Each structure stands twice: as C-alpha cells, then as structure tokens.
Image (cartoon, helix red, strand yellow):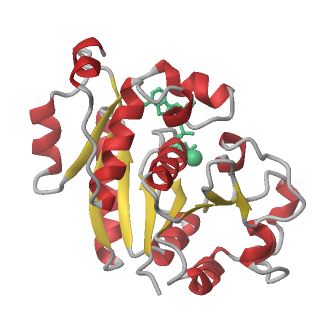
Amino acid sequence: MVKTKVIGILSGKGGVGKTTLTFNLGTALTDFGKNVLIIDGNLTTPNLGIHAGIPLYPKSLHDVLKGKVDIYDVMHVLPSSLKIVPASININDLKGVNPEFLASSLKDLVGKLDYILVDGSPGLGKEALSVLKSSGEVIGVTTPELPALTDLLKSIRFVEENEKEYLGGVINMVENKKYEPKKEQVATLLGELPILKTIPYDKQVRYALAKRMPVVHHKPYSKASLKIKSLAARLSGKEFKIPWYRKLFS
Ligand SMILES: Nc1ncnc2c1ncn2[C@@H]1O[C@H](COP(=O)(O)OP(=O)(O)OP(=O)(O)O)[C@@H](O)[C@H]1O
Ligand SMILES: [Mg+2]
C-alpha cells in the first residue's frame, strides 16, 4: 500500500491559476513516474475537464456526490497516464449534490495512488471547505497583487483552523512589472509562510489551454513549464535541473 498525499489546490481570489496548476502539476508528477489523480472540486464552475479536453462525459463527480455511482466509474485516464475525475459543466447536475461527501468519496482511493490533487473553488465557502476537509495538505495559489495576496492570507487561516498542513504558496503569473509588489514586500506580507514557487506569466499557458493540453507537454521548455516541473520535482523528491541554456535564453 502506498502513502497517498491528498493535496488541495486553493486560493482566496478566483482566476489566479488553480486549475492550470492542478492539471500541469498532475501531469508533471505523472511524468516523474508517480501515480496521480486530479479531481475537480470546483462543483459550481468546474473547468478541469475543459483544460484536459474532456468537457462532456456521461457521468461525473456530481453523480458520485449524489451517491449514484462509484468514483472509479467516473475516472478517466488521459494519454499521459494522468487520471482525472471531472465534474459536470451542466448546471442541472448541481441539484442534490452534497459537497460534504467529497472526503468520504476519496477514502477508497487512499493507499492506491501517490498523489490526489483536488482543484478547489476560490474563497472560503462550502465548496472550498469540502476540498479542504478532503485534503491532508494544501497549496495556496495567488497572483502578485495585493487583493489576491490578502485573500490568500485568509485562506491560510482557514487551512490552519481546519488543522491541515500548509505546504506553501505558488505566486503565479508574475510579470516583474513595476506595479507588482516586490519580492521582499510579498515575503513581508506572507511572513513565515513558505513560498513553494513563483511562476511567470507565460502566453504558452494560454496556447496550451486552447489546444486542451498541459503546457508542460505543449511547450515543455517554456518558462512556466520549467517552473511547474521544478515544483513537481521538489514535491516528489526528484531531481530536475533547468538546462543552463534555457535559463540564459528564457
Ligand atoms: N502562468 C500563467 N501564465 C499565463 N496565463 C496563465 C497562467 N496561469 C494561468 N493562466 C491563465 O489564467 C486564467 C485563469 O486560470 P485558471 O482557470 O487556472 O484559474 P483558477 O484559479 O482555476 O480560476 P477559478 O478561481 O475561476 O477556478 C486561464 O485563462 C489560464 O490560462
Ligand atoms: Mg479553476
């Protein structure tokens, strides 16, 4: 039996890159030989299936949470070997769904996978809470903007109150523009809280989404891909070195 890490990907503010990170980190961990499942825990506005190119499917996580089917019945295996449990994009499927069942739905999977990454809803509502309760550890995602950083701090309080382990933050879509808070300012705001990785704004992420591909496969050496792969290596204890010429020319 393997030790399964269930990691919730959460944020205070919406649109900061949780789904993008879930899909790409899941792919990168799979490429490092890990057995990984990604789950769309954003039940009201799910996107993970769209990112992965499987937006329409007969059964989804919503049916699992209604007690209709088993989680294995809605698990898809992508060409990369990454497993995915999508949620339904049909608003009618929301009726009768209880997000609180998410934690119990995952119990059967524990011991069978290396990682379960749960893509969360932004904020501190019922949906985000269900993702938090299902997870052992949390990665917080933010952009380098004051509102997003402030909201992340609230999410971290939420993580601590629920006695979950906060692995650290990912500062996404960094452009190093003058209007962004400086690295030191971000560090001061976050205090002792660890920053796992900063990921640059990279238009290849947008191209990859248009192609329904993870950017780590669409452009494996793009700036964002290298950072995501390096995060996957850090989490899984693998070695990953960014080639010196990529550092030079990126
Ligand atoms: N590093 C990046 N560089 C450029 N674009 C990015 C990057 N990360 C994410 N994006 C883009 O930002 C948008 C929002 O990303 P995403 O949907 O992953 O955010 P989210 O936090 O999951 O949103 P929500 O809170 O609505 O679930 C998408 O169009 C995505 O392609
Ligand atoms: Mg999302």
- Please report the residue visible at 82 percent of the width from the left and 79 percent of the height from the top: 69
Residue in the foreground of this view, choosing between 147 and 229: 229
On the image, the x and y values in percent for residue 178 come to 22, 14
Report x, y in % for residue 46: 68, 51
The answer to which image quadrant residue 144 occupies is top left
Quadrant hosting residue 130: bottom right
Task: Give the quadrant of the C terminus.
Answer: top left
117 up-or-down from 99: above or below: above
Viewer-side residue, 132 vs 51: 51
Looking at the picture, does residue 130 appear above or below residue 193? Answer: below
At horizontal 39% and vertical 76% (from top left) the residue drawn is: 136
Q: Which residue is drawn at 51% across and 22% down?
A: 204
Give 51 or 158, whichever is nearer the viewer.
51
On the image, which quarter does residue 246 sit in? top left
- Seen in the picture, residue 247 relative to 114 is either above or below; the reply is above
- Counting from the top left corner in percent of width and height, residue 237 is at 27, 60
Q: Tell whether 142 sits left or right of 198.
A: right
The x and y percentages for residue 199 are: 33, 34
- Left or right of residue 93, residue 250 in this image: left
The residue that appears at 85% across and 63% down in the rendered structure is: 93
